[in-house]
Amino acid sequence: MSTNDVRVRFAPSPTGPLHMGGVRTALYNYLFAKHNKGTFIIRIEDTDQTRFVPGAQDYIMDSLQWCGIIPDEGPGIGGEYGPYVQSERKAMYRPYAEQLVETEKAYYAFDTPEELDAVREQAKQMGMPNWQYNSVTRVSLKNSLTLPADEVKRRLDAGDPYVIRMKMPRNQDVRFEDTIRGWVVVNTNNLDDKVLFKSDGMPTYHLANIVDDHLMKITHVIRGEEWLPSAPLHVLLYDAFGWDAPKFAHLPLLLRPDGNGKLSKRDGDRLGFPVFPANWTTSEGELYSGYRENGYFAGAFINMLAFLGWNPGTTQEIFSMDELIAAFSLDRVGKAGAKFDPDKTKWFQQQYLKHTSDEELAALLKQEFDLKVEDSRVVAFCKLMKERATFVKDMMTEGAYLFNAPTNYDEQTVSKKWKAESPALMTEWKEQLEAIADFNTANIESAFKAFLEAKGLGIGAVLPLFRLLITGAGMGPSMFEIAAYLGKEECMLRMNNGLSALQ
Ligand code: GLU
């Protein structure tokens, strides 16, 4: 097989918004496809209509788009193997289910849900809480293996409801090699006769998934660990059809920050971080918050996700999508659960913000806030504020004083630093400032140093007072840069205002 034949798919079910674990699965599929110059496909698995949630498919497609995980084939994109939404492929599945019945790999079962509930209840009372429809119990149930052939035909002709179940072989070891976990061996005595097809014409997940992976020529199935228990059944289904199975790679779970259990959709808002790529509002009006609306850059989110289960084997941590594509391999995906770290996520965002150009940041800031100042001023503002910010909006919260003169003065700094002699000292410094002909950062800094020396004072005795009068704040970026940014006239105005406010 040439590497160009690599075809992988991300196959979400539209049962709600895409959790960040789902985005990671999509990302690893995408990186694997692109690294191998293969094809990345999106397939929507909506055969379970009872769990269908309106809007979920659009949410999934929109989130992946935001993340830069762009499919080569999929709904709304097209491709040779479509349609890519399983409900639109409904008519394709029945012949495959019937083929399995004909070859005696599957059978019709007519037991009603009520009958099965009764059997389950009876088993529970006899101390067997985990009753299953399987190779042992099937012999005493209502199916085409126990009923006479004419009775089966009569029921089918009459349109009696039925399901088609997998005829799980007895006591057989199923083995397959998982790229991440190595050899997996499961005995069929531990597997039940899963439903493959229902008389409403809908396949279940298992059948549709195998048929579609085969028809879409999928070479590698890369999916979450929660699907590992289904893999033996899938391997048996490929066998039953006489098809080659794709290679399997089951990704490690995403764990809560304390390592205690799987990261769930409720954890995020409970523990104060988003779990979803973008905001999602349920039909009951409940909001799950998203990375996008929280101000994260898609690149930072993706970079963080890439490291939840994979590492490049070097110390490099910041990767663009192209660098991830170049570096990614399944060999470096571990099998141990990956702990999600909200602080590290913020760190990635901070690094991305730091590496974004002042011009780009200025454009983003203007999108978010209505700034009535020249573009070059906004660019200079971003240059000043970005070192201290994690999110674009932080620059505004932290640096609002660069746009508007302060009206409040940080109380803590006032009580700690503003002394009886401060007004006189600051008046003197103001005069020094005023005398600077070319009011730039370097000149302001050297005037300040000369002033300290002349007064025999340390920086800590003077700088906080200067900052307080100009910004109202106790901390911030370089005061010399701030003063140069504001200009002499504005600085004089602010010094005067501050001096009268703090008399
Ligand atoms: N539809 C399944 C899901 O929602 C796909 C599992 C698979 O990739 O086989 O995750």
Image (cartoon, rainbow, N blue to C red):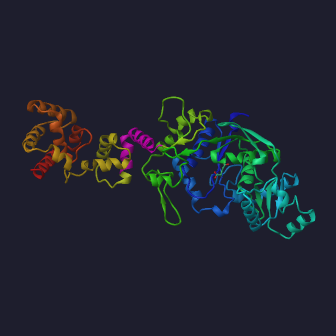
User: Does 142 lie within the magenta span?
Assistant: no
**Where in the figure is residue 349, as x and y percent of width and height?**
43, 43
**Where in the figure is residue 370, as x and y percent of width and height?**
33, 55
Q: Is residue 78 visible?
A: yes
Which of 226 and 311 lies nearest the eye of the viewer?
226
Q: Is residue 72 visible?
A: no
Which of 417 and 281 lies nearest the eye of the viewer?
417
User: Does 348 lie within the magenta span?
Assistant: yes
Is residue 203 toward the left or the right of residue 365 in the image? right
Which of 307 and 116 lies nearest the eye of the viewer?
116
Is residue 30 toward the left or the right of residue 124 in the image? left
Residue that protrudes farthest toward the front in the picture: 126
Residue at image point 52% right, 38% down: 307
- The part of the chain drawn in magenta is 341-365
- Residue 479 lies, with reference to residue 78, above or below; the image says above
- Residue 154 lies, with reference to residue 305, above or below; the image says below
Residue at image point 54% right, 34% down: 311
Magenta stretch, overall SS: helix
Q: Quadrant of residue 91?
A: bottom right
Quadrant holding the N terminus: top right
**Where in the figure is residue 152, as x and y percent of width and height?**
88, 64
**Where in the figure is residue 211, as x and y percent of width and height?**
75, 50
